[in-house]
Image (spheres, coloured by chain):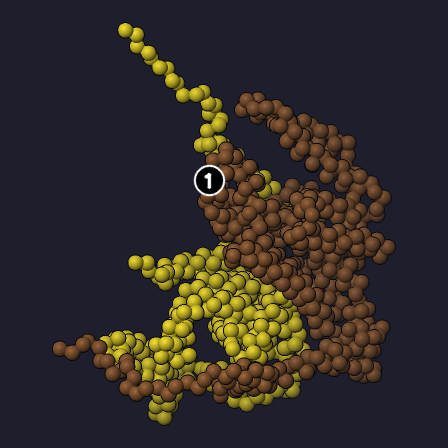
Chain colours: A yellow, B brown
Amino acid sequence: MQTVVSQTSPPKKSFLYDPKVRGVFYQVVLVAAVIFLFYVAATNAIENLQRAKIASGFGFLNNTAGFDVSQALIPFSAAGSTYGDAFIVGLLNTLIVSAIGIFFTTILGFVIGIARLSKNWVVAKVAMVYVEVLRNIPLLVQLLFWYIAVLGSLPQPRNSLEMGAGFYLNARGLFMARPIYASNMWILVAALLIGLVGTFLYRRWAKQQQEQTGRQYPVGKVTLGLVLGLPLLTWVVLALAGVNPISFELPRKGTFNLTGGMQILPEFVALLLGLVTYTAAFIAEVVRAGILAVSKGQTEAAGSLGLKPGQTLRLVVIPQAMRVIVPPLTSQYLNLTKNSSLAVAIGYPDLVQVFMGTVLNQTGQAIEVVVITMGVYLTISLITSFIMNIYNRRVAIVER
Amino acid sequence: MSTAVDMPHFVRAKQVEALPPPNLARGPIAWIRENLFSGPFNTLLTLVVLYLLYVSVPPLLRFLVIDAVWTGTDRAACRADTGGSESGACWAFIWDKINYFIYGSYTISERWRVNIFFILLGIGVVWLLWLRAPRRDLGAVYFFWLFPVFSYVLLTGGNESFSARFWLGFAIFGSLVMALFAFVAAVLKTALRPALILGGGIVAFVGLTLAVVDFDFGLTHVPTSLWGGILVTLLVATVGIVVSLPFGIVLALGRRSKLPIVRMASVIFIEFVRGVPLITVLIMANTMLPLFLPGDMTVDRLLRPLIGTALFASAYMAEVVRGGLQAMPKGQYEGAMSLGLNYPQMMTLIVLPQALRIVIPGIVNTFIGLFKDTSLVAIVGIFDLVKTIEASRIDPNWAAPTIGITGYAFAALFYFVFCFGMSRYSLGVERRLASGQNR
């Protein structure tokens, strides 16, 4: 018998055609190119730095700064503070303008976004014009405009505008009373904390009651009373007892200038105005898109259940719209934080102006300064997107 | 046992009054009543908004148009103490400085070159953006190769006069590239001709570009330090789009690649750039680029922010393109692969033409952002429109109280016209693309 041995060896194929081999090859080339690029850049940088006699390393952070900053939330002086302190001052200034800006821009943005969907023709058109105008003009131009408009129309310190209650306005900024806290301030803080905890507990209880019995409780009024009323009442009682926890230092008018009190820089006001109005236009669009994403059937169903328009908005539309709104809203918050770096154009001492401007110019240590500054912004972005991801997972539609 | 829920709180006891029949009245008065005064709250809202309009619009109109100063040769026209008007915008100032705002300090006798650049730019933009324009593939070649090369020659004067050594070096480099292609073809046992054509094409492409830049067209050299105004604004925006679109596509493909290192490199680049403000990138380009180059090499001061904005825009463009790639149904990829197309063929012939088409609105929106961001180059000392206005604002010849605001109003108007036009375009495309979907 003859056995047929079939020698079906696989067709000869060059390993060069193997996608895996090719993939490895491409990646090796990429890595080599990147390493080469970094190597060339690093050697050049070292050589250039040596020739220009510029020190390297992060030791400069401990050197005396020798310049003043117009707004510092921590004690800062030209003689006694270091570049490290300057960094912290700049960072805090960036954070505070971003935080206040985010607060106001959210409110304004939501108002305008909802106004754009209003059935009232005039309101909707005005909101639309606002969005189109503000979105299509560069923030830098708006900031410079605000800066001139705010600063240019204000009087010199000699003839400050007196606005009552210790408020003065002049070209150097807004002056107001500075609170001085006495040692028994903790009582007020404690009252506030108690109010917050009480509100939280009451809200949980009210929700439970509503779910069980359908009875609704005045959550809003109680919240207001606990959070605002309780600390206020404590304050009044303490003040009447003669141990006032907060006293105010009023700015006094001298011959040429105001002394004492608290000063808000015009740069800060201009930057805040610019950031808030600009970002609000984008947030308005985000809000509008989010509300439109809730299908009309939801509104109609809510109406047919007998909910009032306000309740429909609060209980049905907004909770669903939030799911669509929040991710782009966060990226707008990040944009605002990043855009606050435009402060450098009008001289508000933010991180970029103080650290990437003055410190970089004084020390010449470009690489370290750039790395630190970018690192700060990157960290803020990464933390925000991390929190965002957690939130997204929580609000994602639960599929059955 | 009763039900767990206390019913009376949920259910009405009494019948609700029937709503009035819908108002069928037509006409302007009915419309006003329905849209503006349909209830107390709505009426109040309308009145408040109308009051706000009354407070803001007439003064604005008065400032910009009615009380504005239209003619004049120096500050006298816009100062109250010299008999001028201070209550309106000083357009005479803009009119006097308009050439500076458009060309910067560009040599006056050579400004026709800038005008030709504007025209060439307009042709390229229309060719690419008008969806029914003929031969838009040629338009892409024009916009991404011919136009940049010719603009470079036009604006700088070209005539780089490369040395003979340079051309010798290029010849050696060219033959090396050809040899490499031939070698690869030989190793892979494929036809030699296409490989040589491809290699020759690349060498010819680079060579032709260099030859045009090298050729002496008889144009005088205009250093970039003289450029300014709208010219620089448009230049930064154009370079941004010309570089960021191809580079962004590459990055997007990298991010969607199956190769882990390629994907990681793309992700790191994109997320890094998107996580930092543009100003820091510009300052980095300004201070660190010179450090990274050999000591005897310098980077043109205008080139540094150009590189910065181009890289910055690329990262954003990459995310837009990635959106388009992800929107492509998987069947398109599988269909292409089952036809035996390789990766470049699949991408250039099947996926990208469709993906790019659906992200045109996104690309235009990114471009609007880029166009607005070009104003930031003013902060690193480049004389774009904003910086030229800043510089003219302090001209003693035009020292008047309304000059600053007038200047910025002009800038705002300029940016608004461009950005608003582009956003209308992108809306139009969006609608056109959507119209195919709803049959």
State the image coordinates of residue A146 (x, y, percent, origin top left). Answer: 63, 73
Q: Quadrant of the C terminus of chain A?
A: bottom left
Type of amino acid at the residue the image marks with label 1: Glu
* Residue at x 49% of width, y 86% of height: B39
From this viewpoint, is residue B79 visible? yes
Task: Name the residue at the top extreme.
Answer: A1
Horizontal side of B28 relative to B166 (left or right) equals: left
Residue A156 appears in the rendering:
no
Q: Residue at x 61, y 87 (%)?
A: A161
Q: Position of residue B259 (x, y in %)?
A: 46, 39
The residue at the far left in this view is B1
The numbered mark 1 sits on a residue in which chain? Answer: B
Task: Give whichever of A259, A174 is nearer the camera.
Answer: A174
Q: Which residue is mark 1?
A: B334
Q: Residue at x 47, y 58 (%)?
A: A381
Say few, some or many: other residues with alpha carbon within 10 Å of mark 1 (under 14 / 14 to 19 / 20 or more): few
